[in-house]
Image (cartoon, rainbow, N blue to C red):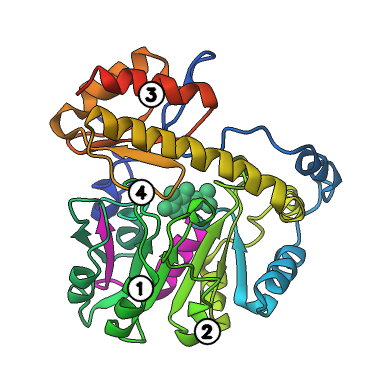
Amino acid sequence: MTDPILPRIRPAIAALAPYRQGKQAGPDAFKLSSNENPFEPLPSVAAALQHTTPINRYPDATAGRLRERLGVRYAVAPEQVHVAAGSVSILQQLVLATVSVGDEVVYAWRSFEAYPSLPLVAGGTGVQVPVTSDGRHDLDAMADAVTDRTRAVILCTPNNPTGPIITSDEFATFVERVPSDVLIILDEAYAEFVTAPGAVDGLAERVFERHPNVVVLRTFSKAYGLAGLRIGYAIGHEKVLDAARTTGIPLSVTSAAENAAIASLDAESELLERVAVIVERRTRLVEGLRTQGWDVPDSQANFIWLPTGDRTVEVAAAFASADLIVRPFPGDGIRISVGEEASVDRVLEVAATQL
Ligand SMILES: *Cc1c(COP(=O)(O)O)cnc(C)c1O
């Protein structure tokens, strides 16, 4: 049989690998491949899901109650808050709003798997700037990579998957070096897990006020444990966020997600206690692995990075046979989420056999 003739796909899209999700775990396995929160939802958050708009009705297109709430919390107008179905949606909206054919987006590499497709989908080009040997953004090299075609720069702190943060000082120096008409997206998906002094915190420092070209991204998926509901937000200049709202698909945020996000803000102190538990497990993992002799970068997120190089696939298979589903990046390393208590020792046991 000959292949059927299919519609012509844009070459930039055809060349991209389709998205592959972290492996699903069997009943006895720990799923440590997607940086999810291992804790069950809080009862108050689960209860909030019962009080949503009836499902035969569309949700509030503006997620007005949540934007109002976040506006109060960060002392900004609701117009300076944008809510979407995951902060990944906001990343795409911002890139579609700024990048035309031939334009460039600068980001660190290795960083978040979602970044490479963003400029390509918009018809632009990605410019990857290698992270340093200890997994940190090389901000001088990133500023050097900005050209008159650059429309956006994405910074990820703490960096997924390597773990280190960008400091406030590094960020301040970087922003001064980038032309003020270039969008800087500060992706802080793991901000709640940061304990290192000196880390940039785009919201606490209100960087978007001094620099209207900076948009800060946060998500309810990680520390707040709402990954399955798809909800994240951005804080920035109203006009920049209006452009993101224009490119976004309307009505993507369900009232279930909005209610759960508000209930999570109500229960924030309880959720942050869980974050502290994860941070303590992270510390045990990093210290345990370093004691074994692994060169693990300083993670400030809810995952750790094991530099396994050419042995990545083999080492990931050893974890899988111990019912630990991790995220291998062949030829480079393995990202392991900080999960359930019992997974900590099991990760250390397997890692000890793989040096
Ligand atoms: C998980 C993650 C996100 C957030 O994803 P959601 O779409 O909000 O679930 C954003 N950026 C990075 C770097 C991430 O790892």
- Circle 4: residue type: Gly
**To which residue does mark 2 refer?**
209
Q: Which residues are magenta?
A: 88-109
Q: Element at badge 4?
A: loop
Magenta-span inclusion, residue 105: yes
Q: Element at badge 3?
A: helix
**To which residue does mark 4 refer?**
163
Q: Earlier in the sequence, mark 4 or mark 2?
A: 4
Q: Tell me which residue sits at (30%, 79%) in the image.
A: 173
- Circle 3: residue type: Val
**To which residue does mark 3 refer?**
347
Residue 148 position (above or below residue 17): below
* Residue 110 placement, left or right of 209: left
Quadrant in the picture for the N terminus: top left
Q: Element at badge 2?
A: helix
User: How far apart are the two marked residues, 4 and 3, measured between alpha carbons?
Assistant: 17 Å
